[in-house]
Image (cartoon, rainbow, N blue to C red):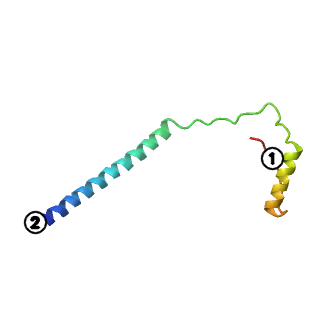
Amino acid sequence: MENLSTAFMLMAVGMVTVFTILLVVILLGKVLTTLVNKYAPAEVQAPAKHSHSPAPIPGNILAAITAAVNVVTQGKGKITKIEKK
């Protein structure tokens, strides 16, 4: 019976130790995230402006896109804008 008692005591100490270490890791992670966001915020980049207008989409490709949208949406879809990326 004494061995069983020692085993449960050792298990409880191990579980408390693991829980404590995980709690410390989580708290340090939150503190580090807060400090990084406060003192080194992410740089916001302005969107690049295109000096030239985009090339027009060829008629055969536009017709294929329109046909695909009509088939998929059963004629209920509407194409409002097509952009080449």
Q: Which residue is mark 1?
A: 82
Q: Name the quadrant of the N terminus.
A: bottom left
Residue at (26%, 53%) from the top-left corner? 17
Q: Is residue 42 left or right of residue 74?
A: left
Tell me the kind of residue under disc 2: Glu
**Looking at this view, is 66 or 52 the one in front?**
66
Residue situated furthest bottom in the rendering: 1
Q: Is residue 48 left or right of residue 41?
A: right
Residue situated furthest top in the rendering: 51
Give the x, y percent position of residue 84: 77, 42
Give the x, y percent position of residue 81: 81, 48
Q: How many residues crowd around disc 2 within 10 Å: few (fewer than 14), some, or many (20 or more)?
A: few
Helix, strand or loop status at disc 1: loop
Q: Which residue is mark 2?
A: 2
Give the x, y percent position of residue 8: 19, 63
**Looking at this view, is 38 or 72 the one in front?**
72
Q: CA distance from mark 1 to mark 2?
A: 77 Å
Query: Residue 61: which numbered mark, if any?
Result: none
Q: Name the quadrant of the C terminus.
A: top right
